[in-house]
Amino acid sequence: MLKKSILKGRGAQGNIHNRFFELSHELRDDFLEFCAKEGEEVDQNKTQYLPVFPKTIVNKVASPDVGMAYSMNMYQGCEHGCIYCYARNSHEFWGFSAGLDFERRILIKKEASKLLEAFIKRKKWKAYPIVMSGNTDCYQPAEQKFEITRRCLEVFLKYKHPVGIITKNALILRDLDLLKQLAKDNLISVNISITSLSEVTRRILEPRTTTIKKRLETVRILSANGIPVNVMLAPIIPSINSHEILSLAKSVSDAGALSIAHTIVRLNGAIGEIFTDWIQKTLPDRADKVLHQIEECHGGTLNDSRFGQRMRGEGEIAKQINDLVKLARLKYFKGKSMPKLNTMLHEYYKDDQLSLF
């Protein structure tokens, strides 16, 4: 049963100390936000959009555990408010808290498409899939206002460059016209995150995300239009969504997904404190059980930074989760696979030569 004192409409229940600051500090909002639904009290702090001006936009991904070599993020921070999000820690580098600041102070890179175009036009650049976004969702609510992701897709299409997308927002369907054109040349793959089939679970884990029904519909529409979709059952959290693995796999396969991927939750950096505070307020009856089971998956700690181990965990609980995912693949994805993206066309379009014809 939910405690009445929890902050609804947000994931984190407050801000925590930024590890890069010697002294704690307090940041204040000047505006109120009204987003109450069905009479519920919600967080009264309005989301702020703050422009930033980086010199580059494409990042080389060094981690061997992540299925991408290059990524780009047009937004820092994410209004979706997923309580488990590993990207929360990155907000500390900008001088903000990994807690509520991550959800309500969104940094906007308005020049992202220009930076991307300059990057992929470099003479020495050989086309390799670039993923939007490796850190925060490129179709989070801010995208509806700023349309930075759409402009970047237009650049990828113009130069016939392969691109991957990671999102949990149905807003991606707004850009179906561009996605279909990219798919004609096998230049696009989409990864949709679906962590539960329960709206109750979705609302507390990911308070400002697209509903499960809409996400399954998104998988169905993208797949029907020839756009390959992988569904990320991530993260799997023991005793919260771990019992849903087979039903999730069947549902997304029926919707047209070609594959699934998963991770076992790990609460690195500041996220351990944020998640612990959240679960003690939101699910107090099972808080200790969940936290202890997460620790069992990571050698007795909430965090695990070991490459090759951190995403899959260890111990009996982790083995059960990983075995269930293997079974799900055998049962629901036999004969299915994601296609390899086309990297051959970009070289001919890089210098705008074909635009003359």
Image (cartoon, grey):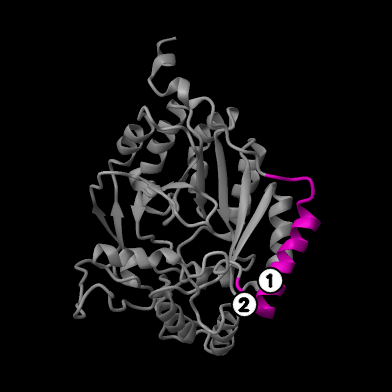
168 drawn magenta: no
Residue 338's spot in the image, x, y percent? 66, 43
Q: Nearer the viewer, residue 110 or 47?
A: 110
- Residue 33 appears anywhere in the view: no
Q: In what element is the residue under mark 2?
A: loop
Cβ–Cβ under 8 Å for marks 1 and 2: yes
Q: Which mark is residue 238?
A: 2
Q: Is residue 57 visible?
A: yes
Could you tell me which residue is drawn at 42 percent across and 56 percent down? 135
Relative image position of residue 246 (x, y in whole percent): 74, 65
Which residue is at a point 34% across and 78% down the rendered structure image? 14
Q: 211 left or right of 208?
A: right
Name the residue: 24% across, 66% down.
95
What residue is disc 1 on?
A: 321
Secondary structure found at label 1: helix
Residue placed furthest toward the top: 357
- Kindly identify the amino acid type of the residue bearing the numbered disc 1: Ile
Q: Is residue 324 left or right of residue 213?
A: right
Binning the other alpha carbons within 10 Å of mark 2 as few (below 14), some (14 to 19) or many (20 upward) gives many
The foreground one among 217 and 94 is 94
Residue count near mark 1 (Cα–Cα under 10 Å), binned few <14, some 14–19, many ≥20: many
The C terminus - image quarter: top left
Who comes first in sequence, dot 1 or dot 2?
2
Q: Which residues are magenta?
A: 313-337
Quarter of the figure with residue 117: top left
